[in-house]
Image: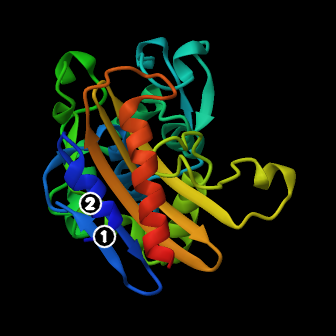
Amino acid sequence: MSQSTAIAERYPHPLSFIGKNLGTGKTIAFAPRKLMPTASCIKLPMLVALYDKAERGEIDLNEMITMQPIDQIGGSGVLKHLTGGLTLSLRDVATLMIVLSDNTATNIIADRVGIDFINATMAELGLSSTTLKTRIDFGAIGNEVRNLAESTVADFAILLEGIAKGRLISPKASAAIKDIMSRQHYLDLLPRYLPANPYARDLGTETDLAVAGKTGFFPGFRADTIIVDANGQTLVMAAFVYGDDQSFLADNAIATFMGGLGQALFHELTN
């Protein structure tokens, strides 16, 4: 049994994970087809569907969107704090949906792309278990994170591998999606203990390890889906994890567990 699988076996709450080295094909997984909530990781399929629609010529990423006060919603993100009437390109709205997991941006994308189109796109890509159920609506979601969306880590591995290999939608779209993912601000789950420098690009410095991904947060639940480029190797990892810790503290028990899991997966997949 691998170290990461042993870690999962000892964990007292429901979880699933998958890790794959795209160069060697080595794969380590635990309950990879277990249907789980995604929390905000579903925003990655939404981004993919947006780029798919743009590739079809049905939507313009340069379209200017004016945020109305009625659009603003609580939870993660920054648009909720800004003045209504702010105008951003659709591409910038999508970027905020990923890099800050902005809920207002998410609903703008959901309305502009369409939930049915998002789900149909995932089905076409082979993500047969992935379903977005609602835009961000805390009344509809309530205390059950599954009411937002469900998927499997196996589905997300397909998505991540397609992006990493430049085969999802088109090489240009895959590169654009990965670039947005690489700007995400949240690195405290699977890559928590990996030597990623989120400011390397800003400082013009080289880095041996880079992470591109999308996280999900909900009381008592965490999710993470990432591409790791390290020393010429590319890995994809995804994990959906429940736990008792309801907090959003930096040392949340689920988050630190996922950090240890990510560290173990990285070591096993690269050695």
Query: Which x, y percent locates residue 163?
Result: 46, 69
User: Residue 233 appears in which quarter of the rendering?
Assistant: bottom right
- Residue that protrudes farthest toward the right in the picture: 204
- Residue that protrudes farthest toward the bottom in the picture: 24
Q: Are marks 1 and 2 in contact (CB under 8 Å)?
A: yes
Query: Which x, y percent locates residue 241?
Result: 27, 43
- Name the residue carrying label 2: 6
Q: Is residue 87 above or below residue 115?
A: above
Q: Is residue 126 left or right of residue 197?
A: left
Residue at 59 percent of width and 40 percent of height: 185
Residue at 50 percent of width and 79 percent of height: 271
68 vs 245, nearest the viewer: 245
- Name the residue carrying label 1: 2
Q: Is residue 191 left or right of residue 232?
A: left
Query: Residue 73's mark?
Result: none
CA neighbours of label 2 inside 10 A, class few (<14), some (14 to 19), many (20+): few
Can I make out residue 250 in this image? yes
The total number of labels drawn is 2
Q: How is the image coloured?
A: rainbow
Q: What amino acid does circle 2 point to?
A: Ala
70 vs 214, nearest the viewer: 214
Element at label 2: helix
Query: Which x, y percent locates residue 31?
Result: 16, 60
Q: Is residue 8 above or below residue 250?
A: below
CA neighbours of label 1 inside 10 A, class few (<14), some (14 to 19), many (20+): few
Element at label 1: loop
Q: What amino acid does circle 1 point to?
A: Ser
Can I make out residue 225 in this image? no
Residue at 54 percent of width and 40 percent of height: 186
Query: Which x, y percent locates residue 10?
Result: 22, 49
How far is disc 1 from disc 2 in space, using C-alphas? 6 Å
